[in-house]
Image (cartoon, helix red, strand yellow):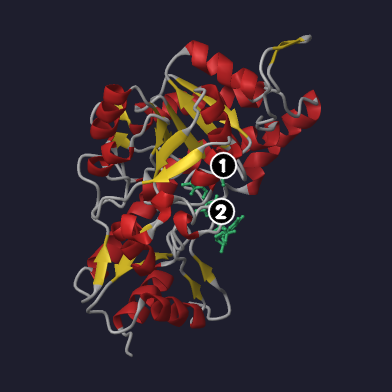
Amino acid sequence: MNPDKPIFVTQPAMPPLAEFIPYLEKIWEGKILTNGGPYHQQLEQALCDYLGVEHLALFNNGTIALLTALQALGVSGEVITTPYSFVATAHSLLWNGLTPVFVDVDPVTLNLDPARIEAAITARTSAIMPVHVYGHPCDVAAIDAIARRHGLKVIYDAAHAFGVRVPGGSLLNHGDLSVLSFHATKVFNTFEGGAIVCHDAAMKRYVDQLKNFGFVDEVTVVVPGINGKMSEINAAFGLLQLQHVDTALARRAQIDAYYRQHLQNVDGIRCLPVPPRSTANHGYFPILVERGFPIGRDALYQRLKDNGIYARRYFYPLISDFPMYRNEPSARRENLPVAAAAADSVLCLPIYPGLSAGDQARVVELIQESRP
Ligand code: T4K
């Protein structure tokens, strides 16, 4: 390892630049830069085929896609969600004037715990927004059943769940809508980008209207929409990325296996289990630094950092601890003990296709050799 070269938690996989030039030449020729151009249309179809979903609407990022998904379903009042996520999940609720109701997570998956959802439902609840955190599937069967029983909408924040399959097909086919992120830090990136996965053509049409200011034709605006469109450059890049994504996923799987093999017997380090009965995309490699490890989580974070390795504490602080959320009654830490313990012990190790074997070994050694 080169000690002067920092190792970040992730690094985007980039195709050879030469392969992108022909796409750019086409854009320069055609002068269509955005507003549902040819690359945009091709990428929507290519992603439907690759992911195994019926309909998908591209967006300029995952956050705008989350905002739009809530609009598309007409969600109002309270929304049950997880405190253990990136802050965009709950921000999308506040931006829609909705009240987040935080419910604790399952101790094994760190996803919203279905056993705790029903106690949080009130007359004002209209939806559930779970997150497939680290791409590990939520208990979709239980959540979908609760939603049906209570007449609630389900919007999965699937920002981490690109390509994940469960028995029966794509994980993204669950709930009313699923939202993807194609940010630079994700397993499949279009620099910035995102998508809403939906199940019928009418919903896809409506989402397309919402992401284009509400236009249905040149002179007709039917809803107060937003500008959520993905540009042609991003869409073209996505098409190229798609050709390389399987190689990138395979490489991530190798790194995941290496970390598991070398960390499984380290006292006080717990790797999250590989989800049973689903494919994984290995977007993140979280470890929990627990009692029994010679130093605390923050000391390990610092030790790695001092050695040029920038692991990240995803997801600490809990969303419910941020100032705009902490006064919600559901945000009390006593209400969220499992999420709080995870936030205080989690550390995401570097994982990305370009991470060398030497750098992986260095990460493992620094953990194994930690002393007070
Ligand atoms: N829901 C969930 C569950 C999410 O995790 C996210 C995003 C969203 C919704 C919203 O989707 P988007 O609107 O973003 O599409 C990063 C990402 O910015 C964010 O997209 C992601 N989740 C979150 C988990 O992580 P930061 O603030 O930690 O990113 P940053 O800039 O510190 O990047 C981490 C490391 O990655 C850097 O140290 C270096 C490396 N990096 C980063 C970028 C941006 C690169 O090598 N190249 C790059 O271009 O939030």
Q: Residues within 10 Å of mark 1 (few under 14, many from 20)?
A: some
Disc 1, SS = helix
* Residue 123 can be seen in this image: yes
In-front residue for pair 164/91: 91
Do callouts 2 and 1 mark residues in contact (Cβ within 8 Å)?
yes
Write down the quadrant of residue 315 in the picture: bottom left
The answer to whether residue 83 is visible is: no
Q: Left of 34 or right of it: where is 104?
A: left
- Using the image as rendered, state which of residue 241 and residue 64 is in the foreground: 64
Residue at x-position 34% and y-position 33% = 171
Which residue does the image show at 39% across and 37% down from the upper left?
Answer: 163
The kind of residue on which mark 2 rests is: Met
Check disc 2 and report the residue beneath it. Answer: 324
Find numbered disc 2 in the image and state the secondary structure of the residue it sits on.
loop
Residue 316 place in picture, x, y as percent: 44, 63
Indicate the position of residue 29 as horizontal and vertical percent values. Answer: 80, 27
Q: Which mark is residue 94?
A: 1
Q: Which quadrant is home to the C terminus?
A: bottom left
Location of residue 124 (image quadrant): top left
Q: Amino acid at mark 1?
A: Leu
Residue at 42% x, 60% y is: 351
